[in-house]
Image (cartoon, rainbow, N blue to C red):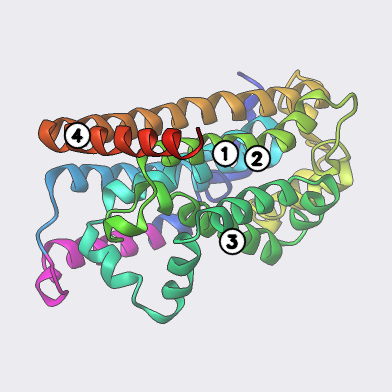
Amino acid sequence: MDRLMSIRIFGFIGNWSPFLIAFMIVASIVYFLITMKWYKDIPGGRKLKTSEFWMSVSVIILFYITFGSPVDILSHILFTFHMIQMALGLLLIPPMLYFAIPDYLWAYMIKLPVLRVFHKIGQKPLLALVLFCGAFSLYHIPKVMDTLKLNQSLHFASLGVLFILAVIAFWPVLNKVDPPEKHMNYLFKTLYVFGIGGLLLPACAMIIFTETPLFKTYTESAAWLKSMELCVPAGVLDSLKDQNMISGPEYFSNMSPLSDQRTGGVIMKILQEVFFGFIIAYLFIKWWNQESKDPDEITRRSLEAANERKKMEELYR
């Protein structure tokens, strides 16, 4: 832990991303003005519910912790923290958005030109699933990830694409805007969530079970120092290099690169199972409540299904 605390040498800007703080303050003010004051100008607008307010606050705080706090700089130092960042940023925050942003605002946003395209993708569950899981797996191919982490523009763009695809991927199971006929039933929604976990498994398995470290930006000094330029001011990093204070991630941890890599993969899978467990529990409760609303309707559907089975049996006797 003492070694991890050594990240203080990177200074306030490197550790706390004040520019992201400023951006998030402005974005939060605009969001709460829209949802608490200007909502009357949006069709179907209503005041933000208490649950939505606190979920929105949680999303804002969690987003900053994930991409702006020392977690971000640690994600460039240790692969373990990179995978924690991926789990929080791609598997927790996107689902939370569906409970934070009011349904009328979603309905308004998906009618905007660019977002309309994203909405159409979200209405095709298989496409949304393959795009997100494919992009996640592609990002974690060693050559690809090392290349992205050595270029600031490519790195930020790739994270942005992954985040957007993650939000789209959860649309088929969590959106409250599409009409009922556009929704999968709760069984298929549950299978869809398992599908995300299943398609992410190969990338995590590669990371966990390989016998050698895969990523140069976490093992080779030159590549690691270059990747640190993404989150540490150039003057601070140059000063530390001139003083020979740092040469690689080993300065901040006792873990070997392979142990760090495997730990990251395991933590990613554990967090994924926990987050998806909550989503599946939510889907089960929604299904249970829906089925319990009208017992007569449930009985009618069961009788219809039984009659259909009987007809099929008679047909193929």
- Magenta residues: mostly which secondary structure? helix
> Which picture quadrant has residue 96?
top left
- Which badge, 1 or 3, is on the more N-terminal residue? 3
Q: Nearer the viewer, mark 1 or mark 3?
A: 1
Q: Nearer the viewer, residue 72 or 271?
A: 271
Mark nearer the N terminus (4 vs 3): 3
Q: Residue 14: percent from the left, percent from the top?
A: 58, 48
Note whether residue 253 is visible: yes
Q: Which residue is mark 4?
A: 298
Task: Read off the residue under disc 3.
Answer: 161
Looking at the rendered structure, the secondary structure element under dot 2 is: helix
Relative side of 69 to 53, left or right: right
Q: Are marks 4 and 2 in contact (CB under 8 Å)?
A: no
Taking depth in this image into account, of 183 and 117 the one nearest to the observer is: 183
Are the residues tagged 1 and 2 within 8 Å (C-beta)?
Answer: yes
Image vertical order of residue 190 relative to residue 135, above or below: above
Q: Answer few, some or many: residues within 10 Å of disc 1's Cα (few below 14, many 20 plus, some between 14 and 19).
A: some
Residue at the spot of label 1 = 195
Q: Secondary structure at mark 1?
A: helix
Q: Mark 2 = which residue? A: 199
Q: Which residue is painted at 19% across and 34% down in the image? A: 298
| Magenta stretch in the rendered image | 23-45
Near-viewer residue (278 or 244): 278
The image quadrant that residue 295 belongs to is: top left
Q: Compared to 283, does 133 lie above or below?
A: below
**Residue type at mark 2?**
Leu
Q: Specify few, some or many for label 4: CA neighbours under 10 Å numbering under 14, 14-19, or 20 or more.
A: some
Percent position (x, y) of residue 167? 46, 54
Q: Secondary structure at mark 4?
A: helix
**29 in magenta:** yes
Circle nearer the N terminus (3, 2): 3
